[in-house]
Image (cartoon, rainbow, N blue to C red):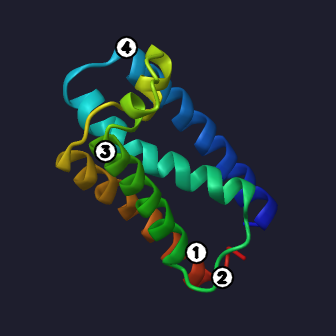
Amino acid sequence: MSKKKLRLLFAITAAALLIAEIVIAFYASGWIRNYLGDVLVVVFLYAGFRAIFFDRPARWYILPTIILLIAFGVEFLQLWGICNRLGIHNRYVLILFGASFSVGDLVCYMVGCIPCYLVEYITKKKGQLG
């Protein structure tokens, strides 16, 4: 598969996951919202980064690790109460950013990074990504 087709595939995947995340944020409840949304958000970030910045870092595991660190960073900002400290009370921003810290969210982010690591490793082995 050409790099152009892979980049398009990543863009389509990111768009589909964004739609899924919006639907989950506004309409889902229970384990779908609490866990599946957190698993999918890191896959969305990965697909989005890969579609926009197609060239791969020097090592195959760097991009998924960066995505995981970003997700962890956002979660720890929730622990710090960043929205309250900044005076953010907009419902949509709170839904997007999240308002409460959870160790379970950290686990979900790690689970979500597994397919990202697999895609990076497999495509690196096949020489399909930059």
Residue 25 found in image quarter: top left
* Labelled pair 4, 1 in contact (Cβ < 8 Å): no
Q: Are marks 1 and 2 in contact (CB under 8 Å)?
A: yes
Q: Earlier in the sequence, mark 2 or mark 3?
A: 3
Residue at the disc numbered 1: 123
User: Which of the two labelled residues, at mark 4 and mark 1, occupies the earlier sequence position?
Assistant: 4
Q: Which residue is mark 4?
A: 27
Q: Residue at x 55, y 33 (%)?
A: 18
**Disc 3 marks which residue?**
80
- In this figure, which residue is indicated by the disc labeled 2? 127
Q: Earlier in the sequence, mark 3 or mark 4?
A: 4
Helix, strand or loop at disc 3?
helix
Compute the Cα span from label 3 to label 4.
27 Å
* Label 4 vs label 2, nearer the camera: 4
Amino acid under label 2?
Answer: Gly
The amino acid marked with disc number 3 is Trp
Q: Is residue 57 depicted above or below 114 in this figure?
A: below
* Residue 27: percent from left, percent from top: 37, 13
Nearer to the camera, 71 or 9: 71
- The kind of residue tagged 1 is Thr
